[in-house]
Image (cartoon, rainbow, N blue to C red):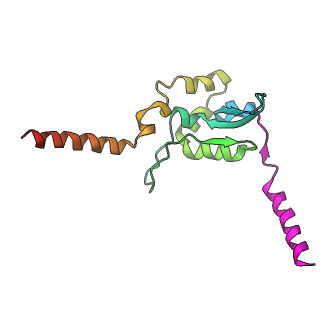
Amino acid sequence: MSYKRHCLLFYVVLLHFMSSNRASEYVKDNDVRLGLRVSTRAANGGPQVTGLQCRFCIAFGREEKVGAKRQALTAVQGWMCPFHYDNIESHVSGQHPTKWVEYKRFDSIVERQAFFDDVPVAFKNSIKAHFHLHLLVLSVKSYSTSRRTSST
């Protein structure tokens, strides 16, 4: 077998595995099952969903892991079509473990919708989402210390 033919065969096999049948089009039932929100639709204004966001990230933010070397991200997780729902479920169970267990206890769609709607201030609208809280505390402390030293 020639080198070119071998490379072509490798490329075809690679494409087959990259476009696995794990990926799928938008399934509306997964919105409620996994706590997702439609973020974008097709550019032509059609009903086709092209982007999803994690409602757990929007409402609660990511949970801090005890002993983690890095600070939890504050960005809202999103996915573009085609969707890998197993990866989405992995994100939700890994980044929001306590809220995910609490959410899975609800059986009805109404209860699951209310789970996100009952949050007083969504995480993405809070100060912590926009600033690192420890930097905010440090700047307030340094400001109050500098005011005391300058007034004497």
Q: Residue at x 85, y 71 (%)?
A: 7
The number of numbered discs placed on residues in the rendered structure image is 0
Answer with left or right where residue 56 lies relative to residue 33: left
Whole-percent x, y for residue 122 in the image:
49, 29
- 13 shown above or below 100: below
Q: Work out which residue is located at the far right of the displayed protein and give it.
A: 1
- 120 shown above or below 139: above
Answer with left or right where residue 5 lies relative to residue 79: right
Answer with left or right where residue 122 lies relative to residue 42: left
Q: Work out which residue is located at the far front of the displayed protein and give it.
A: 44
Whole-percent x, y for residue 25 in the image:
79, 39
Q: Work out which residue is located at the far bottom of the displayed protein and give it.
A: 2
Q: Quadrant of the N terminus?
A: bottom right
The part of the image, by quadrant, that contains residue 116 is top right
Does the magenta portion include 11?
A: yes
* Magenta highlight range: 1-27
Q: Work out which residue is located at the far left of the displayed protein and give it.
A: 152
Whole-percent x, y for residue 76 in the image:
56, 40
Does the magenta portion include 32?
A: no
In depth, the one of 31 and 8 nearer the eye is 8
Q: Residue at x 88, y 68 (%)?
A: 8
Q: Residue at x 56, y 35 (%)?
A: 56
The part of the image, by quadrant, that contains residue 31 is top right
Q: Quadrant of the C terminus?
A: top left
Whole-percent x, y for residue 146 in the image:
17, 43
